[in-house]
Image: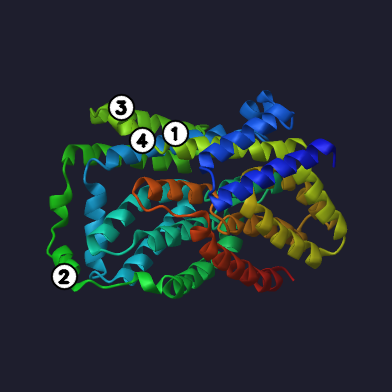
Amino acid sequence: MTTLSWIAVAVFTVAYVLIATEKINRVAVALGGASIMLALGATDAEHAFFSEDAGIDWNVIFLLLGMMLIVGVLKRTGLFEYVAIWAAKKARGRPFPIMVILLIVTGVVSAALDNVTTVLLVAPVTLLVCERLGVPPVPFLIAEVLASNIGGAATLVGDPPNIIIASRSGLTFNDFLSVMAPFVLVVLVVLVLLCRIMFRKAFRYDAERVKRVMALREADAIRDRRLVVISLVVLGAVLVAFSLHTVLHLEPSVVALLGGLLLLALSRLDATEVAKDVEWPTLVFFAGLFVMVGGLVETGVIDAIARSATDAVAGKLWPATMLMLWASTGLSAIVDNIPYVATMSPIVSELVNAEGGMGKAQVLWWALAIGADLGGNATAVGASANVVVLGIAERAGHKISFWGFTKYGLIVTAISVVLAVPYLWLRFF
């Protein structure tokens, strides 16, 4: 690696340590790190702002913006309160069954939608349920974002890295469903059991609060029935368009933005007021993070790491599989998994072709997918959904620290990836 590569690594490392220790506001750190990368020439304006592989992923930014606008309008209808009361009554006010319901909903929906979209819809409901029952919302939010990243791994469309892998490998929607979905189902069950242990102190039962919740009528929570109908129609259209984006030739980001702006226009609400609900600091943080990771991509750091790892195990399929699985997990925990998978895909393609191209060699693609998808659970900045939920929690007055998330994420990630080892062996060897 060149001197510039090492400088880029140093800048990224310092920025990451500052984000992890929270000595400085994470948005300021991300923007500062991005500015230094640009000033040093580790990346440039053309790559930072326009490159698909090494720049700001505007699809992610505008997907988030569009869905945040939709959620901002939905919040004003009372629909979230309706769902919160319904869920609390269904579980008879018991916190752990409520968490299980929310985890299952989050995991299943994340398999069909983008996991960021899912947490944007589920998090407001969670905050309201916890407020009604007097239980701390942080454990519920952490558990849900872990479930969203796990559930998103189940299908081709559930997590952006899977889309990249499919386009490079030729694997189909059904391939992902048959290989990833059974494993994801097992991991979700394990997650529920882990949550019962990890968050046991959060499941306090307040009989008086539960009594008041059980006496509520869900229908009374709806404040604007006309806007509920319009919002659900627009949201439904957006979700259908997400699933048909390859047929419509519209990126999910364009669909989300069109849906958000259309709903804003139809709602007759003050656009300035709705815009206040957008997590602007989160969007800016993502932009800075993308530029910093782009600096690592442009200076060849990620490529050098990947090639060194794969060269070490060429011709040894099982060791190569294990290295791919654990290296992808580790790297996806500290850098966004989208540029990582984009960088690794050509290398994995070469390795698979060297091993015969089909059959058993396909295990390398699945090791990459599992490691990249589940590695995002390890730290607070490992996946887009994590950053979004931390932003929502902070705005609601329930700040989740980097280590407050990571100490649980590391446990869940380690156990999930350990479970992947026998699964890949039994399935392919």
Residue 188 percent coordinates (x, y): 49, 67
Mark 3 vs 4, N-terminal side: 4
Which residue type carries mark 1?
A: Val
Decide if residue 36 is in sight here. yes
Count residues near mark 1 (Cα–Cα under 10 Å), then give few for <14, some for 14-19, many for 20+: many
User: Counting other residues with Cα less than 10 Å from the Cα at mark 2, is it few (<14), some (14-19), or many (20 or more)?
Assistant: few
Left or right of 429? Residue 252 is left
Could you give the CA–CA distance between mark 2 and mark 1, rounded to whole angstroms? 44 Å
Assign a secondary structure to mark 2: helix
Residue with the mark numbered 3: 272
| Amino acid marked by disc 2 | Glu
At 31% across and 54% down in the image, what residue appears? 127
Whether residue 314 is visible to the viewer of this picture, yes or no, is no
Q: Residues within 10 Å of mark 4 (few under 14, many from 20)?
A: many
Q: Which mark is residue 69?
A: 4
Q: Quadrant of the C terminus?
A: bottom right
Say which label, 2 or 3, has the lower sequence index: 2
The amino acid type of the residue labelled 3 equals Thr
Helix, strand or loop for disc 3: helix
Residue in the image at 42% along x and 31% along y? 257
Spatial separation of the CA atoms under disc 4 and disc 2: 36 Å
**Of label 2 and label 1, which has the lower sequence position?**
2
